Amino acid sequence: MLLTAPRRQLLFPLIRRYALQGVVWGVVYALLRFGLLHQEVGLLMRHAFIGLGVGLFVGLGEAFVIGSNFRHKSFLFLLLVRTLLYTTVAALWLLSAASLKCLFFQQLSFEAVFQQYVLHGTFILDVGASLLVCLLIIALQQISSLHGPGQLFNLVRGKYHRPQEVDRIFMFVDVKSSTTIAEELGNLQYSQFIQDFFLDLTDGIVLTKAEVYQYVGDEVVLTWPLPVGLTKAQCVRCFFLMQRSIEARKDSYLRQYGHYPRFKAGLHGGRVVATWVGEVKREIVYHGDVLNTTARIQSLCNELGQELLISEDLLTQLPPLSGVVATFVSTLNLRGRQQAISLHGLTRGLRAAEEVSTKSLSK
């Protein structure tokens, strides 16, 4: 797997989270197994070290084995693969840790270690506990992925349980000619086409610190806290990075589907209300005219012959856009709003295209 700069930004924090969770669970296991009182620091350190190793192996396995090769497999198949993989890894890691301890501190041979720890010790119990830790870490990560990065922590600490006003930027991204492509491909193949499209947007999303708010059919809604989206014009860079990613895989799409996804987007920002909703399924939602306005801006892309439209309200807050040309194209009159919204089309020049290609996606 090509480890591009965006991919590193996605995978390395993920592996780090797995490792830290492994340390925590290793210490918790030691406290539960040996009692909460009169704990030796050395004992806790050893279990923290073992937990660190287990967490690292799980993170590497999820990033480079499971995530790369088994993305479309069933849940039961993945559970079986994970159980076999992480049981084997845990057994080898525990045996290695025990061997190092005995060889260097107790001067015992490997045969003696095997007799003491594997045949007459707690090896099976430790492997089972390590496997349980692996599955707990994975379960937490899967739950977190359903809500988005950081949102599980927000749910636990009660943020947004009461409606709050926040300033955010939104981008509505939609596939062009989606109806025509869907009719030609059929429902199942078109669904796979859209899955691949969303997957190939990941690098641009990660690199610009965007959050996926919603997937709606063949549309994805991205959002940034206002300061994050404005910094280095991240919200604008995101579009061109995603566009470059799709262009890089154009031939692959044409070979597999006979089409490649061209898309359009609308950008706008402002104050919205954020809150948790739902009882059966909990999620953060944003309410406000900003979302309706952004959706309306995106819907005008075809009519105005633009791939990326941005409101003047947001454009004036952005830093200078290197290599990107902003052109006034129209105004948008909204019901209930006295002042019309000026719309600008954003296009990249040769310099912008080179920057996106060489600095971001080729690292």
Image (tube, helix red, strand yellow):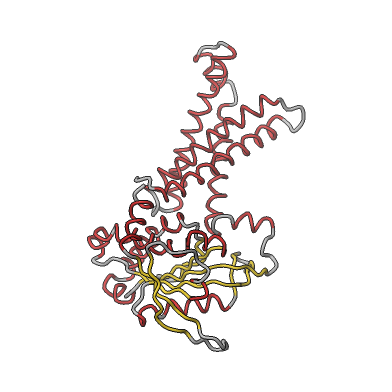
Q: Is residue 296 left or right of residue 305?
A: right
Q: How many numbered callouts?
A: 0
Task: Tell me the quarter of the picture where residue 337 sits.
Answer: bottom right
Residue at image position (36%, 81%) is: 304
Residue at image position (58%, 20%) is: 120
Along the line of sight, which residue is nearer the eye, 208 or 154? 208
Seen in the picture, residue 62 relative to 194 is either above or below; the reply is above
Along the line of sight, which residue is nearer the eye, 72 or 16? 16
Seen in the picture, residue 228 relative to 117 is either above or below; the reply is below
Seen in the picture, residue 269 relative to 43 is either above or below; the reply is below
Residue situated furthest right in the rendering: 37
Q: Is residue 350 left or right of residue 229?
A: left
Task: Tell me the quarter of the picture where residue 225 sits.
Answer: bottom right
Q: Position of residue 358 (x, y in %)?
A: 33, 52
Q: The N terminus lies in which quarter of the figure?
A: top left
Along the line of sight, which residue is nearer the eye, 127 or 4? 4
Along the line of sight, which residue is nearer the eye, 47 or 226? 226
Q: Position of residue 55 (x, y in %)?
A: 53, 38
Q: Position of residue 115 (x, y in %)?
A: 54, 17
Q: Position of residue 112 (x, y in %)?
A: 53, 13
Residue at image position (28%, 70%) is: 185
